Image: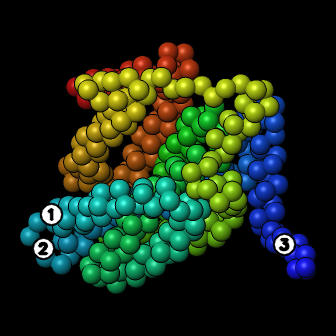
């Protein structure tokens, strides 16, 4: 007779995997774990929000309004007839790269590890930041273009993978609150950059000279390795541990809770309803994306160039431009939280619509 088969040896998970599995086990406790979950107890959520905040501090410090002002002064110093066209071309390249990669990177984020995408993007971005810093220090337009393209690739990767990464690690009932919290930290980071730059301006001089702008912009880029290091503090998500990139903490918690209580999974009947002949599960995201596209087109022609408008028309110095940027960003952060509270009272769609109407009315 054939000898009995030897028992299959099971591979022991590594330390990082063990820690991630332990964290997932704590998060996926049966019986009310979704209600007991807190964002500050999840290492991945804390690291991701901290990484996003630091990234936005750096980006608003070195790649924000002062960067566009630098491009304008650079074009003038090289004798270009219309410096505004040069600024517009570079910003068009950045926006076009992001738009072209939006769908492909979204597909990749659905199929592969979002954590790995964030880490890989940070590595690529380090090269882009190096090109930008060297290009600014040497006033090289070619290097600035190369660095801008790489930076656009990174930001689109971060945007595509970041939101999906949060859905992997945050329960559904708390996802809205965590997204609102992330938006607030996003805006805080965007405002801290100009405030920090304002302190440097007071120390080195409030002028639009190229030498001053070199110091301001390159100082921020020098801090980017912090983001790179933080990206490798992210632990494996439940979808990576289970080997199914479609499995998230949201689904796991929901399924675990229903299994413990014996409840059947609720059916989302609204998804099957039709609007203008299209199912809502398609109509709603398409409508939201169309609204976002229209808003971004309008903002790209206006908000993006507010700093240059105040610099050229009202002769703002660097300190004034930075304080203006920090001020309206803080206001946005405050109103994000107010909108979240309003949505708890009247509903998300109603609150979003009311905020949109108020924003449009304020333009007049």
At label 3, counting other C-alpha atoms closer than 10 Å, the crowd grade (few under 14, some 14-19, many 20 or more) is: few
Question: Can you tell which mark lies on residue 85?
Answer: 1
Q: Position of residue 185 (x, y in %)?
A: 56, 45
Q: Is residue 81 above or below residue 57?
A: below
Circles 2 and 1: CB distance less than 8 Å?
Answer: yes
View extreme (front): residue = 1
Question: Can you tell which mark lies on residue 80?
Answer: 2
How far apart are the two marked residues, 3 and 2, measured between alpha carbons?
72 Å
How far apart are the two marked residues, 2 and 1, measured between alpha carbons?
9 Å
Identify residue for label 3: 8
Q: Quadrant of residue 4?
A: bottom right
Instruction: Work out whether mark 2 precedes mark 1 in sequence or the reverse, and give the earlier one.
Output: 2
Whether residue 85 sits left or right of residue 232 in the image: it is left
How is the protein colored in the picture? rainbow
Quadrant where the N terminus sits is bottom right
Residue 176 vs residue 24, the one in the foreground: 24
At label 1, counting other C-alpha atoms closer than 10 Å, the crowd grade (few under 14, some 14-19, many 20 or more) is: few
């Amino acid at each position: 007779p054939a000898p009995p088969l030897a028992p299959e040896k099971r591979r022991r998970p590594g330390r990082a995997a063990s820690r991630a599995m332990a964290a997932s086990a704590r998060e996926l406790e049966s019986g009310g774990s979704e209600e007991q979950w807190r964002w500050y107890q999840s290492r991945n959520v804390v690291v991701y929000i901290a990484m996003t905040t630091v990234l936005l501090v750096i980006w608003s410090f070195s790649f924000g309004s002062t960067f566009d002002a630098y491009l304008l002064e650079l074009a003038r110093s090289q004798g270009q007839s219309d410096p505004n066209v040069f600024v517009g071309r570079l910003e068009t390249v950045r926006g076009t790269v992001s738009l072209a990669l939006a769908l492909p990177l979204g597909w990749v984020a659905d199929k592969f590890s979002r954590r790995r995408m964030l880490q890989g993007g940070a590595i690529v971005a380090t090269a882009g930041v190096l090109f930008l810093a060297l290009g600014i220090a040497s006033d090289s337009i070619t290097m600035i273009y190369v660095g801008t393209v790489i930076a656009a690739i990174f930001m689109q990767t971060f945007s595509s993978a970041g939101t999906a990464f949060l859905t992997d690690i945050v329960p559904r009932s708390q996802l809205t609150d965590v997204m609102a919290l992330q938006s607030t930290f996003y805006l805080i980071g965007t405002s801290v950059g100009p405030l920090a730059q304002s302190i440097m301006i007071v120390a080195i001089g409030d002028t639009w000279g190229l030498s001053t702008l070199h110091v301001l912009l390159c100082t921020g880029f020098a801090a980017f390795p912090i983001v790179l290091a933080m990206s490798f503090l992210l632990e494996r998500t439940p979808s990576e541990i289970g080997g199914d990139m479609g499995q998230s903490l949201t689904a796991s918690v929901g399924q675990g809770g229903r299994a413990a209580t014996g409840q059947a999974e609720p059916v989302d009947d609204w998804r099957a309803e039709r609007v203008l002949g299209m199912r809502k599960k398609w109509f709603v995201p398409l409508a939201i994306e169309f609204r976002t596209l229209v808003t971004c087109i309008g903002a790209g022609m206006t908000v993006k160039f507010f700093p240059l408008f105040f610099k050229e028309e009202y002769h703002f110095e660097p300190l004034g431009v930075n304080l203006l940027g920090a001020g309206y960003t803080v206001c946005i952060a405050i109103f994000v939280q107010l909108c979240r509270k309003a949505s708890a009272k009247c509903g998300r769609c109603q609150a979003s619509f009311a905020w949109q109407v108020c924003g449009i009315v304020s333009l007049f």
